[in-house]
Amino acid sequence: AQSVSQHNHHVILSEAASLELGCNYSYGGTVNLFWYVQYPGQHLQLLLKYFSGDPLVKGIKGFEAEFIKSKFSFNLRKPSVQWSDTAEYFCAVNGGRGNNRLAFGKGNQVVVIP
Amino acid sequence: DVKVTQSSRYLVKRTGEKVFLECVQDMDHENMFWYRQDPGLGLRLIYFSYDVKMKEKGDIPEGYSVSREKKERFSLILESASTNQTSMYLCASSPRFERPGTEAFFGQGTRLTVV
């Protein structure tokens, strides 16, 4: 079964700083990759996803992520954060090809200071 | 808009009670999932279902069971609730992941407290 690792559970940064959140997965086959965000008091919603093609994917609110197959990684980035980006961010992986399990990492709690 | 509806936002139950958490989706999705969310542990998969009456264990199935008698409804059952099952429970649904661009949609969650 696939598993997902996220590092640096708590991240605190100032507005306009750049954000990068790491995500590594363990699964040898084809994967589908996701980043979800949970704003305080709200349900999880999709930021972006990768299925195939260009390994650099762009999502909502200025976020992007890069799939590096050789490193089993799917890191999330935003060049300049805002206070409204304060949220918890989760990386998720699906094994694809008939595997309908969806596994999540432990999340990154991001606090942006105005 | 896809809608995943969980029957309760908050529940308080006593130790030893049988607890039912209900989830309904309105998008004819094949897959449905139950997770529990705990601080510092992220989302842990309890069970998922890829079709009516079909289920697979997730990473932490002990103490739980599930039922999927209709495509739109997926129930999580705590056979005998214990205090260590106090948590936020999240339901999600998705089309099969073979379809490119598939994503999972989440409900608002049920915060269960077992006393």
Image (tube, grey):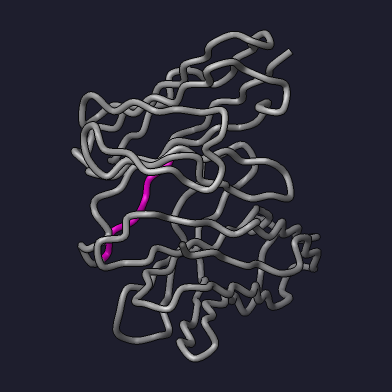
What residue range appears in magenta? B101-106
**Nearer-the-camera pick, B114 or A16:** B114
**Nearer-the-camera pick, B10 or B68:** B68
Apparent side of residue B15 relative to residue B98 in the rendered image (left or right): right
Looking at the image, the residue that sits furthest to the bottom is: A70
Q: x, y (%) of residue A32?
A: 37, 69
Q: x, y (%) of residue B94?
A: 30, 48
Q: Quadrant of residue B31?
A: top left
Asked if residue B10 is among those painted magenta in the image, a careful observer would answer no
The secondary structure that most of the magenta stretch takes on is loop
Looking at the image, the residue that sits furthest to the front is: B62
Q: x, y (%) of residue B47?
A: 44, 40
Q: Look at 23% across and 24% down and name the residue there.
A: B69
Q: Look at 26% across and 67% down and name the residue there.
A: A97
Assign the C terminus of chain A to one quadrant of the image.
bottom right
Is A93 drawn above or below residue A54 in the view shown?
A: above
Asked if residue B103 is among those painted magenta in the image, a careful observer would answer yes
Is B3 drawn above or below residue A27 in the view shown?
A: above
Is A46 drawn above or below residue A20 in the view shown?
A: above
